[in-house]
Amino acid sequence: MLRRTLAKGAVALTTAGVIGGRQAVAQQDPVEIQFWHGLTQPLGGMLEQVVADFNASQQRYRVNATYRGGYGETMVAAIAAFRANNAPHIVQMFEVGTATMMAASRATKPLWELLQQTGVNINFDDVLAGIRGYYSLPDGRMASMPFNSSTSVSFYNKDMFRKAGLDAEKFPTTWPAVAEAARKLKAAGIANPMTTSWPTWLMVEQFSAIHDIPLATKGNGFSGLDTELTINNPLMVRHMQNLIDWHKEGLFRYGGRDSAADGMLSAGECAMTFASSGTRARIKKEARFEWGTAMLPYYDDVPKAPLNSIIGGASLWSMNKGASTGRSDAEWKGIAEFLAWLAKPDVAAKWHTDTGYLPLTRSGYERVKASGFYKENVGADIPIEQMLRGGGTLTENSRGVRLGGFAEIRNIIQEEMEKAFQGQQDAKTLLENATRRGNVVLRNFERANRNG
Amino acid sequence: MTDPALRASRARQRRSRWFAHGALLLGVLIFALPIWITLVGSTHDVNTIGRGDVPLWFGAHGIENYLAAWSRGSAALRNTRAVPAGTMLWNSMVMATLIAVGKITISILSAYAVVFFAFPGRMLFFWMIFITLMLPIEVRIIPTFQVMVDLHLTDSMAGLVIPVIASATATLLFRQFFLTIPDEYVEAAKIDGAGPLRFFRDVVLPLSRTNIAALFVILFIYGWNQYLWPLLIITDTSLETIVVGLSKMIGRGDAQNEWNAIMATAILALLPPVAVVVLMQRWFVKGLTETEK
Amino acid sequence: MRKNVIFRGKLLPLLLLLPQLVITGLFFFWPAGQAIWSSMLREDAFGLSSNFVGLENFTDVILDPTWRAAAGTTAVFAFSVAILALSVALLLAVQADKAIRGSSLYKTLLIWPYAVAPAVAAVLWLFLFHPQIGLIGRALSTAQIAWDYRLNGGQAMLLVIVASAWKQVSYNFIFFLAGLQSIPKSVLEAAAIDGARPVRRFWTVVFPLLSPTSFFLLTVNLVYAFFDTFGVIHALTQGGPAKATETLIYKVYIDGVENLNLGSSAAQSVILMLIVIAMTVVQFRFIERKVHY
C-alpha cells in the first residue's frame, strides 16, 4: 500500500516537475511528502494535527505523517527503506541517532544545505542554545530540524513527603540531601523512596553535563569519530557507587531500562523519580495525589555544578530516497516549507504548551510566560529554567553527546548498571566494563563510517 | 495367586490409578492456570488489575473489554500502538491460511514430481529441497530480510508468506506417502490412458486427503505462531499480526498498560489455533507424529 | 527406494518442481549466500560503504566475551527447557497411558498448549509472574521474597525456561504417549509375570523402548529452544537483565536489527547455521542407525 502511494507521489512529482518548470503548479496534484514519526498517542495525534494544519494552509504539498513504531523501530525502518531505495522524505530521529544520521552524509541532506538550496529561511539565532547545540555541526550550521526536545527533571509525591515529615514544597537540591529524604521516606514506611527513568540518560548523560565533566573525548564526540568514553571518572564512580549503595539500602529502586519506570510515580509505587519532562502530561493525568516538579539534584562540592541539563527527544531529518536516487527540487522545497512551518512562533508555542516539550526559542518561551501559562501550570517552566541554569552558555560538556552507535552504548551502560544492582560488581567495575564495551562500539562505528 | 497377594496387587493398582489421576489433574490445572488468570482478568476494568488485585473470578467488564480490543486496539490510549485486534486477527488468519495452503501445494507438487517421474537431476533437486530442512528461517533471518528489501517485498502480505512456504518436511511426508501408493494404481491409470495430471487429480489427491488435513492443522498453527519474521518484515501497522501485536502492546515493562485489554487480546490471539487443535485433534496428532517436524 | 512404475516426461516434473525450487533458491540459497558474503564485509548501517574484511568478523565474534556469554546462556537455557519439558511430558504420558477413566479428556486438556505461540505463552506467564500484577509475583513479594525478574537475572532465566517449556510439554506428551501405546502389551505382560514392580518395570523395560523417541525429542526440543523461543525472550525480558537471557539467536537479532551491525550479525548467522547443520547431521546419523537395527 505504501509503495502504491509512493508511486503515485512519484508520478505526481514527475508531472509537477516537468510542468512546474514553466508555469505554476497550483492546479496539479500536490507533491506528496512522506513523514515517518515515532510518537505514540496522545503525542502522535498532536503531531498529526500539526501536519493537518500545514496541509490545510497551502495546496502545493501534502505531508503524509505515518507512525512507524517507537523511535528505535522508526530509525531501523527508515534505514532499511533507504537501502531499498524507498526512504521517507522526512524521518523523526531520536537524539541518540544523531551521530549515525550525520555520518551517513549521502543518505541525508543537512538542514543548512536544504535551506540554502531551496531558499527557505528559518531563523535559528533565537533557538535555545541547548537544543541548537545538540543538532548542529561543529561550525554551528544546523544538521537537522529540532522538533520535540525534552529535558529531564525530578518529580515527587508531595503527600508522601508530608507523611515522612519532609517539606513538601522543597525538593532536596543535592544528592546527599536526596538520600537523607529517601531515608526519612523509608522510615515512614514507603517501600520505594526513589527510582529513575532512562538510567543512562539521567544518571550518566545528564549527570555529566550538570557537573561539567566530559562523557567522551573529542568534546563528547562532537569533533570526531575517534572519540572514547570517559565515564570512568571519580565523580561518576562516586555517584554510581551511591546509587548501588542506596539500592542495597532500599532507598533507590532500579525500575528498568529506558522509559520502563515512567509509570511508577503516578501509580504511587515510589516517592521520587527522575524522568523526562515530557512525563508531566502523564503524571498530571494519572496521579491521584499532590505532586511536584523540581530540577535535577547535584553534588554541591563540585565546583562548576550545577550547569544546564541537556536535551533528549527527537529532531527531523530530510533523507534521500536511496543511495542512487535523489529527490526533485519540488520535493526538497516541500520538505523545507514544512520544516519552516514547524518553526513558526505560534505553531512552536502551541506544540510546547500542548505537549510539555521544550519551547524552541527563547522568545517563544518569554511569550508563553507572558501569557500566564506557567502560573496556571506550576512547574511547567522548570525544565526550561533548568536548561538555562549556569547562565545558559554551554560548555563542551553540557552541549550534548554525539556518539555513533549511541543506542547500543546506552544499552551497554544499562546492562552494566543492572549487573551492579544485582550485586555482581561495584561502581568502578561497572564503569570500567561500560567504557571498554562502549569503546568497541565506537571503534566499529568509526571503522564502518571512515569512508562513508 | 493367594488372596492377600491379589488384594495387595489390587490395592497397588488402585493407588497407581489415584496417582495417575492426581498427576494428570495437576498437569491440567498447571496448564490451565495462566489461561484462567488471563480469561478472568480480561473481564475486569483496568484499575482492578493495575492495582494488582488479581481477580480469580469473572468481572463485569468482559464485553466492553473485548469490544474495545476488537475495534480500537488495546492500550490505544497510552504508550503502545493502536491496532484493532480485529485487523490483526484477520491478518493472522490470512497469513496462516496462505502459509498452510502454500506449503501444502508446493510440497505435494514437488513430491509428486520426485516420486512419479524419472528425469535428470531428480535426486539433485530432491537434496536441494531437503537441505533447507537444516536451516530454520530464524538462522538466516537478516540476510533473508535483505533479500526481501531487494525484491521490494517488505511490508506486504506476500513478503510475510512466501519466504516461509518452502518446506522440506511437507515434501518429505508426501514423498513417504506416495511411495506407499501401489504400482498397480499407476499401471491401471496407464492402461486407462490417463496422463500424469489426471492421475494426480483423480487418484493421488483423493488418497492424500487425510495427509493434507493433518498437515494443514500443523502448518496453520506454525503459520499463526510466526513471530520473528513478521516482527522484522512488517512495519506497516495495518499488516500487524496478532502474536506480534500482542507482545508490542506490553511495551517495555510499562506499569500503566491497559492490562485488561491486553489480556482480552491474548485470549483472542490464542483462541483460533487452540480451537483448531482441540476440534481437529485426531488430524493434529496424526500430522504431528507423522511429519516428525 | 524408488518406484518401478513411473510416468515419462521431463518438462512436466520440472514444472511441478519449479515453485519449490524458485522459493528455495530465492529465500534459501540466495540469503545463505548473502549471509556468507556479508559476514566478510564491514558495512555502515545505510549500506553506503563496505569493505571486505575477510574473516575478521568471525574472529571478532568468537573473541567477543558477550557472544561467548550468549553461547553459554543458550546452552543452559536449551538444556533446561529440554529436560524440564521432557521429564514432565514423560510423567504425564505414563499416567495417561494407564487405562483410567477420562484419559482421552485428559489428553485433550494436555495438548492444547502446543497451539499457543511462544510469544503468547510468554505473555500468559507474565500475567502470573509480573511483580505488580501477577498472581504468583505478588504472592512472592508478600512472602518477603524479593521477586523481580526485571532485575534478577536468575529469576528472569527461570521465567523464560518455564514459559518455553510449558508449551513444549504438550508436544513431547503426544510423542511419548504414541511411543508408549506402540509398545506391545505382550512385552509388558511378560515383565509383569516376571514379577517386576511397576516402577522397576518402567525403567528396565519401557524406558529403553522409548529411547529412540526420547532422543528424537531431545533434538527437537533443543532446536525449539534455540530458535522458536525468540518470541518468549523478546516478549518477556528482551535478553535482560544485564544479558542474563540473551541467547545466540537473540543476539543475531539485536546486533543485526537494533545495533545495525550487519557484518557481525551475518557472521553470527553463519556460525548458527553450522551449529544447526551439525545437529541435523547427528540426528540423521542416529535415525539411520535406528533404521538399520
Image (cartoon, coloured by chain):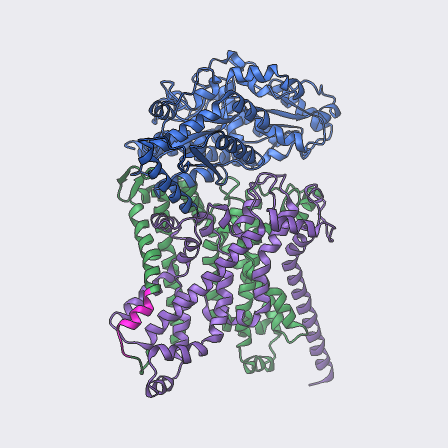
Q: Chain B is shown in which shade? A: purple
Q: Position of residue A392 (x, y in %)?
A: 50, 13
Q: Is residue B89 above or below residue A215?
A: below
Q: Is residue C13 magenta?
A: yes
Letter of the chain shown green in the rendering: C
Work out whether residue A296 or residue A341 is closer to the camera in this orientation and state it. Answer: A341
Work out whether residue B275 or residue A159 is closer to the camera in this orientation and state it. Answer: B275
Quadrant housing residue C177: bottom right
Q: Position of residue A178 (x, y in %)?
A: 63, 22
Left or right of residue B144, residue C79 in this image: right
Q: Position of residue B30 (x, y in %)?
A: 65, 58
Q: Is residue C242 above or below residue C276?
A: above
Residue drawn at (35%, 60%), measured in percent from left and top? C23
Kindly report the secondary structure that dominates the magenta region of the rendered protein.
helix
Quadrant housing residue B11: bottom right
Is residue A250 at least partly visible in the picture?
Answer: no
The stretch in magenta equals C8-18
Letter of the chain shown blue in the rendering: A
Is residue A119 at least partly visible in the picture?
Answer: yes
